[in-house]
Image (cartoon, rainbow, N blue to C red):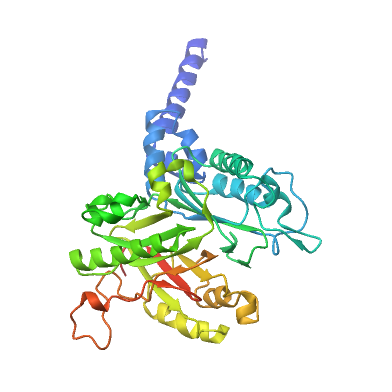
Amino acid sequence: MATVDDDAGTSEQAIAASTWIMTESHEFLQNMLSYLPALELVKCARVCHQWKKEVDLILRSREQIGWVSYNYNTAREGGSDHILGHFGENLDECVQSLWSIPYHVLMFTELVRCTDYTIGTRQRGHFSMPGCGFGRQQKWQEIHHVLDLIRDRLPQQCNLLSIQTSGTVGTYRNMQLAGESEGDGAATAILFPKMQGVNIEHLKVTRKSLTEGSLREALGIAQTPDIKCVLLFGFGNTPAAQFLATRLQTSFRETYGWDPVIAGAIGDDLLTKQDLTKEEIMTKVIGVTFSGPNVHTASVLLDSNVCSKDHVKLELQKLKKVGLCEKKSVAFMFACVGRGVDFHEEENAESEAFHELFPNTPLFGFFGNGEIGCENFACGKAMTSEEDDGDSCMDKLPEIMHGYTTIICLLSFGPAT
């Protein structure tokens, strides 16, 4: 006959076994925790040292890129009670469901005020540009308020770079195009996690770095010779962006004998100015660099003669033939404000052409007032033309600043295939 002591001993054994399973069984913990999104895993990591160890292993194995897009013309019907409208709802859903923790967020937006996000900028056929109708001080108060709301929804260590534009290009989370917005009221954001063999850094520029000494040393990138791609954004100052892009071309060619992909455009304004010094703001140019052995990239230029969807697809075939892996990839499209529906006489001509050829690659970008970039299919080697004898002469560097064009840059992440 069992005694009270026997029952107590059995209970203690059962508790001990359960505790062992919940704290020491690697297989059980991996299986249980693997079903949770990243932010839930961060909470679980606080339970004990063993759980934190298992969470770290799981998060290191995940490299999911997230994104959010909103376009007033193609957004789902009905209003939203969210302070940032449907964009805010989608951002919350994205961050909460992501399998990786975002560390870098790149945002292109036509929207400035909270009301821009909740009602868009077109009402009853009346068009008004976002940010118009209020003074400079009030404008920046509104901007900082919106940025604070966005940052509150991101992990604390996340870097945010937000640029106000005259038009955007985006992709919904279900891989359907959000379309090309030309001031209709749209925003898009790309959330990059930490990825093995990939390093993403903001490129902050001062006047001194543009005029004195080695450009690479002045910009703090002298120790990263494996930079594969530089996204450059000017805001209200085309010459500074053009000068920096040209100097980057020359510096890389002279020092390393090869050409990184350089792509970008001139936007309306930089919204995240509070993250820069006054000297960095004065240059009116900022960038994002992608470096590391697991970064692979190429770019194509659509010039003013490319004026139909079929012609766009023909040019994009050059990008397709490079053969970059599309499993974990993103693409950026930087188009002239004049290359929209009026230019092509149909909506979304360029973004739809890209989507048809690259259905598994989300596309983001904006319409700007000057495009930065060139065709670059060299994938980390020096570009040469058919007329070259194989030597990469400095006087044969391609034109880097354009008008009435579109630059499309494809970025692929992962081991080379």
Above-or-below relation of 152 to 164: above
Q: Residue furthest bottom?
A: 387
Residue 201 appears in the rendering: yes
> Is 354 situated above or below 310?
above
Q: Left or right: where does residue 138 sit relative to residue 412?
A: right
Q: Quadrant of residue 167?
A: bottom right
Residue 233 % position (x, y): 44, 59
Q: Nearer the viewer, residue 188 or 358?
A: 188
Residue 47: % across, % down: 45, 28
- Look at 24% across and 77% down and name the residue there: 395
Left/right placement of residue 379 relative to residue 359 reads: left
Q: Give the image location of residue 18, x and y in percent.
A: 46, 29
Task: Give the farthest residue toward the top.
Answer: 4
Q: Is residue 188 above or below residue 369?
A: above
Q: Quadrant of the C terminus?
A: bottom left
Left or right? Give the position of 83 relative to 6.
right
In front of the other: 224 or 176: 224
* Residue 111 x %, y %: 63, 53
Residue 414 shows in this picture: no
Q: Residue at x 22, y 74 (%)?
A: 394
The residue at 46%/54% (across/down) is: 64
- The total of numbered circles placed on residues is 0
Which residue lies at the image location 32% right of the left edge and 60% below the top edge?
294
Depth order, front residue of 241/180: 241
